[in-house]
Amino acid sequence: MRVLGIESSCDETAAAVVEATDAASPWQLRSSVVASQVAIHREWGGVVPELAARQHLRDIVGVVDQALADASSTWDDIDALAVTQGPGLVGSLLVGVSFAKAVAAARNLPIVPVHHLAGHIESLALHNGDLPYPAIVLVVSGGHTSLFHLPSPGVYQLVGRTRDDAAGEAYDKVAKLVGLGYPGGPIVDRRARQGNANAIAFPIPKLTHEDRNAGPHTHLPVGFELALKRRTDFSFSGLKTAVRRHVELATDGGRRALTDGEIDDICASFQRVVIHTLLERTFRAAEWFDARAIGIAGGVAANSALRSEAERRGAASGLPVFVPSIALATDNAAMIAAAGLRRWQLGDRGHALDFNADASLAL
Ligand code: KG4
Ligand code: ZN
């Protein structure tokens, strides 16, 4: 069974071929092509939706052709399509969804619409083979910081999420505040390695009040409501504000520039708090849910310090920690094909062509 995955929810146009032989064997990654638009959006300091949609239109055909060629496949070898239906930028999503529907109609192929976060979650199984279940999975990216309980394969129960900024968004904003480039995550990661993580005592985010914004529904198992209340959510906007205040003071209100050493220390100290917060909540949740494994996926899972600290904590607590490869952590289509394969294995045989891109699709 060969699935072609298509992903275009934000600023990467991606296509990939993933193959499943039998239920016992792990999925096989045959190809994964990602056309990044970073160079286009860098000039603006963030993703410009209209430019993103237009670039997806230019890139999609070539990216899909390349993914087929890299997989030594033609359309005749493809058994099904999987495409990101949402969430994301609607103009971007529409390019992938329309392209996939057109192919499905022309080639008479089944098509499985996929939630972007299901893709991030299944990047773990694609890279590591199936996780032990139940598992707790943290999806930490530019748009999301969400904690999922997976009682069994392909069942994703949201048990916590950020109430404001996503962790990746905080990285990008902090990078901007200290005058580093875009996207900020990888640059802050690099600079933090040279800095002193204890130089600045940024506050550890604490959630002391009820969530006043409704936000997406979180699923709390019966009996856990009180124990989990307030304890599995995240918040990063206060930390971002603390960094801004620190920079204002340190630069005398912008009258002098930060030194390289000061920037390194800010990056390292900020990152220490982010990683501590992410892992503290995730490991607590794993305890509460009696999880047999922890997974960490999404763009921020590419962070070197997060990966090593998660591994250290996992070893100390005897809980295996799974991460995707760096290439499968940031947006790609192999994870979308994997999420499509998961649905297929659970009996989903594709969808009629009347589904649409959904910018705020719920999982
Ligand atoms: O999953 P992703 O590619 O796209 C979304 O679905 O959002 O995640 C992108 C986010 C960006 O905010 C980027 O700064 C962050 O992941 N990121 C990192 C690293 N690499 C990417 N954050 C921290 N350290 C990294 N090494
Ligand atoms: Zn993503």
Image (spheres, rainbow, N blue to C red):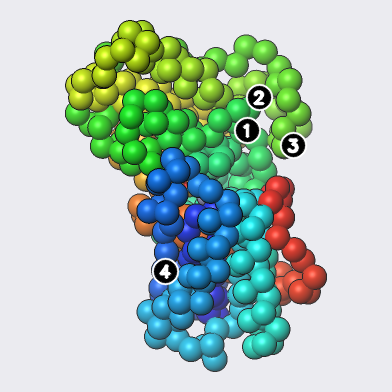
Marks 4/1: CA distance?
30 Å
Marks 2/1: CA distance?
9 Å
- Going from N to C along the chain, the mark reached first, 2 or 3, is 3
Q: Amino acid at mark 1?
A: Gly
Number of the label disc, if any, that sits on residue 1: none
Q: Position of residue 245 (x, y in %)?
A: 43, 12
Q: Residues within 10 Å of mark 4 (few under 14, many from 20)?
A: many
Label 2 belongs to which residue? Answer: 228
- Going from N to C along the chain, the mark reached first, 2 or 1, is 1
Answer left or right for 30 relative to 53.
left
- Going from N to C along the chain, the mark reached first, 4 or 1, is 4
Q: For mark 1, give the secondary structure.
A: strand
Label 3 belongs to which residue? Answer: 217
Marks 4/3: CA distance?
33 Å
Instruction: Tell me the mark number nearer the camera, choosing from 2 and 3.
Output: 3
Residue extending furthest front?
Answer: 255
Residue extending furthest bottom?
Answer: 76
Marks 3/1: CA distance?
9 Å
Label 2 with label 1: CB-CB less than 8 Å: yes
- Going from N to C along the chain, the mark reached first, 4 or 3, is 4
Answer left or right for 271 relative to 78.
left
Marks 2/3: CA distance?
14 Å
Number of the label disc, if any, that sits on residue 32: 4
Label 1 belongs to which residue? Answer: 160
